[in-house]
Amino acid sequence: QVQLVESGGGLVQPGGSLRLSCAASGSIFSIYSMGWYRQAPGKERELVARKRNSGSTDYADSVKGRFTISRDNAERTVHLQMTGLKPEDTAVYYCNLRRYDWENGYWGQGTQVTVSS
């Protein structure tokens, strides 16, 4: 089993910053990618950012230039530095780990990010 524990969500004003962290533990023998997804009320879950073991990254167009993903392979952690937050960034953010590119992978319990004045 794989466990993912997220931290760092909260309430922030527009233009503010937050840093999300996710720590993975359990039976992990390989990691293809770690990343972050989010789901706003009434919307589907969407990719925010993902970093593969190769070092390549994917970002949603809506967060490019504002969010930065980083990974510590040795510690099996992934972070999401979010700056210039907007109300439309409000969502539950989920950490995702894929051992292989063909699987949906494992999910954390989610952490709420609310951007509001």
Image: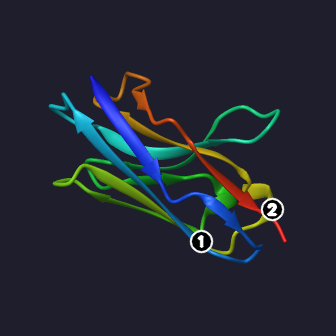
User: Between marks 1 and 2, how big is the CA–CA gap?
Assistant: 17 Å
| Label 1 SS | loop
- Other-residue count near label 2 (Cα within 10 Å), few / some / many at <14 / 14–19 / ≥20: some
Residue 42, given in percent of the width and then of the height, sits at 82, 33
Kind of residue at badge 1: Gly
Q: Is residue 94 visible?
A: yes
Q: Which residue is mark 1?
A: 65
Instruction: Residue at 80%, 62% (x, y): give it.
Output: 87
Residue 43, given in percent of the width and then of the height, sits at 78, 34
Kind of residue at badge 2: Pro
| Label 2 SS | helix
Instruction: Residue at 46%, 36% (x, y): give it.
Output: 108
In the image: residue 14, left or right of residue 48: right
Image: 82 above or below 62: below
Snapshot quadrant of residue 78: bottom left
The nearer-to-camera label among 1 and 2 is: 2
Q: Is residue 82 visible?
A: no
In the image: residue 78, left or right of residue 82: left
In the image: residue 48, left or right of residue 91: left
Image: 31 above or below 71: above
In front of the other: 39 or 57: 39
Instruction: Of the two numbered discs 1 and 2 on the same chain, state the one appearing first in sequence.
Output: 1
Q: Point out the image quarter for the C terminus.
A: bottom right
Instruction: Residue at 76%, 73% (x, y): give it.
Output: 13
Q: Which residue is mark 2?
A: 87
Name the disc covering residue 43, or none. Answer: none
Q: Point out the image quarter for the N terminus.
A: top left
Residue 9, given in percent of the width and then of the height, sits at 58, 57
